[in-house]
Amino acid sequence: MIAISEAVILMAGSGSRLRGSDATLLKPFVPVFGRPLLSYTMDVLVHARIRNVNFVVGYEGERVVAQVKQMVPPEIEPCFIENHEWKKQNGISLLAAAKRVVGPFLLTMSDHLFDHTIVDRLIRSADPSLLNVAVDRKLAAIFDLNDAMKVQTRENQIVGIGKNLRDYDAIDTGLFMCPLDIFEYFEQAKQNGDCSLADGVRVMAAANKVCAIDIGDAWWQDIDTPEMLAQAEKKMNERVPSTVV
């Protein structure tokens, strides 16, 4: 098991698909059962005993930082990293954290909900020399499969990734255990100064550096649209409250 004490949360985007024309709405704080969406991510990190959390902000950065400071639990030591190029893809937000993290770290998004068991399994199973990606093989259970990040695996190795991937057997859940050299590969992945997370994963996969960790029966949901938010609340309402933190 890897000893992990640090995480990076990507939250620099504008969340336009969820907020629509409401410029006052900040996606990380959209209420889910009366609680800000981001609070569920922080609960998961507290459960995993991850203390040092790097929040990568961009859109409405000052407002976002102010609201995070009001809600961050005492178990978490926050660090705020500004991505001035937040209009670019999310790989650039990850690269903004390159000079802040000091060892293997957990990477996640501010707009995903997870069973805490996924993080437990990822930490327990991860190879510290590889990029470990939590993947869901329950394809029939995926809400809005067309929008999902598809993954092709060969045994436990990821060999392909992309939303338009034709041959795939799993879905990327947006939760990663990262080696420190991930930043070198993402620099290689940049084209015209830009790259996505998927672009960086492809470069690492070509070097046989990406491992898939199956989440099994655990539940997760990304929240990119009002429909995804409604689906998440529906599923959470059907579950025992203590299974999602």
Image (cartoon, grey):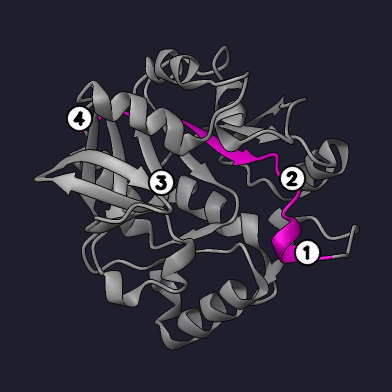
Residue 53 position in % (x across, y down): 56, 33
Residue pictured at 87% horizontal, 36% vertical: 62
Inspect the magenta stretch and tell me whether residue 7 lies in it: yes
In front here: 190 or 114? 190
| Image disc number at residue 19 | 1
Q: Dot 4: what SS? A: loop
Inspect the magenta stretch and tell me whether residue 33 lies in it: no
Mark 3 or mark 1: which comes first in sequence? 1
Residue under numbered circle 2: 68
In front here: 160 or 86? 160
The span from disc 3 to disc 1 (Cα, nearest Å) is 23 Å
Mark 1 or mark 2: which comes first in sequence? 1
Mark 1 or mark 4: which comes first in sequence? 1
Taking the image as drawn, is residue 130 in sight?
Answer: no
Mark 3 or mark 4: which comes first in sequence? 4
Q: Is residue 184 above or below residue 62?
A: above
Residue pictured at 41% horizontal, 54% vertical: 164
- The three-letter amino acid code for the residue at tag 3 is Leu
Residue 64 position in % (x across, y down): 80, 44
Q: Is residue 240 above or below residue 102?
A: below
